[in-house]
C-alpha cells in the first residue's frame, strides 16, 4: 500500500437529517428536515408549519456527501401531528430544552413523476448509507 493511502482520514457524515426548502404556487415557503428518504418520496419534520394532504410543493435539497441537487415537484400524502410532554426528550430542533406543549409535525411527501437520474442518485445514496441492499 502506498504511504498516501495509509494517511487518508475518512470523515463520517450523518446522513440524516437533510435540510430542505419547500415552496408552492401561492408563495408559501418554509423549511424542514428530511428524516427518511426513499426513491419515491421522503418523511420530513416541519416544526410549526402545517401542511394538508394533496397539497403540492416544489422541494429543493442536496443529497449529503454526493453533493447532488434535487429539485422536484411533490405532493403531501400523509401527515403525522403529535403533542409531546416537554419533560421528555428530544429537545427542540435548535437544541434548546423544550418548554410547554411541544408540537411534532411530520409529513410524508411523494415525488410527482420523478426522473430516472434523480431516482438513481437517491438510490446510490441509500445504498451508500446502508439503508437499502446493493
Image: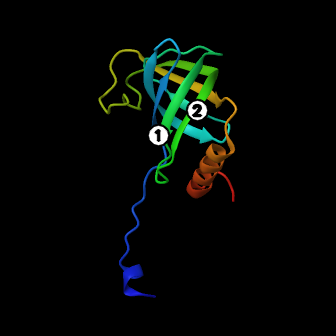
Numbered mark located on residue 72 in the image: 2
Q: Residue at x 46, y 88 (%)?
A: 1
What element does badge 1 sit on?
loop
Q: Residue at x 43, y 17 (%)?
A: 48
Extreme residue toward the top, this view:
26
Q: Quadrant of the C terminus?
A: bottom right
Q: Are marks 2 and 1 in contact (CB under 8 Å)?
A: no
Q: Is residue 41 left or right of residue 97?
A: right
User: What residue is rendered at 35% in x and 78% in y?
Assistant: 7
**Mark toward the start of the polypeptide (2 vs 1):** 1
The residue lying toward the viewer, choosing from 127 and 102, is: 127
Classify residue 96 by image quadrant.
top left
Q: Nearer the viewer, residue 122 or 42?
A: 122
Give how far apart the Cα atoms at labels 2 and 1 are. Answer: 18 Å
The number of numbered discs placed on residues in the rendered structure image is 2
- What x and y, as percent, mark residue 81? 54, 18
SS at badge 2: strand
Left or right of 118 in this view: 13: left
Q: Position of residue 17 (x, y in %)?
A: 46, 40
Residue, disc 1? 17
Relative to the observer, which residue lies in front, 122 or 36? 122
Q: Nearer the viewer, residue 44 or 93?
A: 44
Residue 79: x and y, percent? Answer: 60, 20
**Hey, which quadrant is residue 38 in on the image?**
top right
Q: Residue at x 56, y 22 (%)?
A: 57
Side (left or right) of 8 relative to 42 = left
How would you rate the neighbour count of disc 1 (Cα within 10 Å): few for under 14, some for 14-19, many for 20 or more?
some
Amino acid at each position: 500500500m502506498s504511504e498516501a493511502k495509509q494517511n487518508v482520514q475518512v470523515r463520517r457524515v450523518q446522513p440524516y437529517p437533510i435540510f430542505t426548502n419547500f415552496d408552492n404556487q401561492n408563495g408559501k415557503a418554509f423549511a424542514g428536515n428530511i428524516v427518511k428518504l426513499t426513491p419515491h418520496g421522503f418523511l420530513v419534520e416541519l416544526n410549526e408549519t402545517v401542511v394538508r394532504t394533496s397539497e403540492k410543493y416544489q422541494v429543493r435539497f442536496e443529497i449529503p456527501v454526493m453533493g447532488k441537487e434535487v429539485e422536484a415537484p411533490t405532493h403531501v400524502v400523509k401527515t403525522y401531528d403529535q403533542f409531546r410532554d416537554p419533560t421528555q426528550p428530544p429537545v427542540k430542533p435548535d437544541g434548546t430544552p423544550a418548554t410547554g406543549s411541544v408540537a411534532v409535525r411530520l409529513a410524508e411527501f411523494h415525488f410527482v413523476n420523478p426522473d430516472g437520474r434523480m431516482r438513481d442518485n437517491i438510490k446510490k445514496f441509500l445504498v451508500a448509507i446502508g439503508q437499502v441492499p446493493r
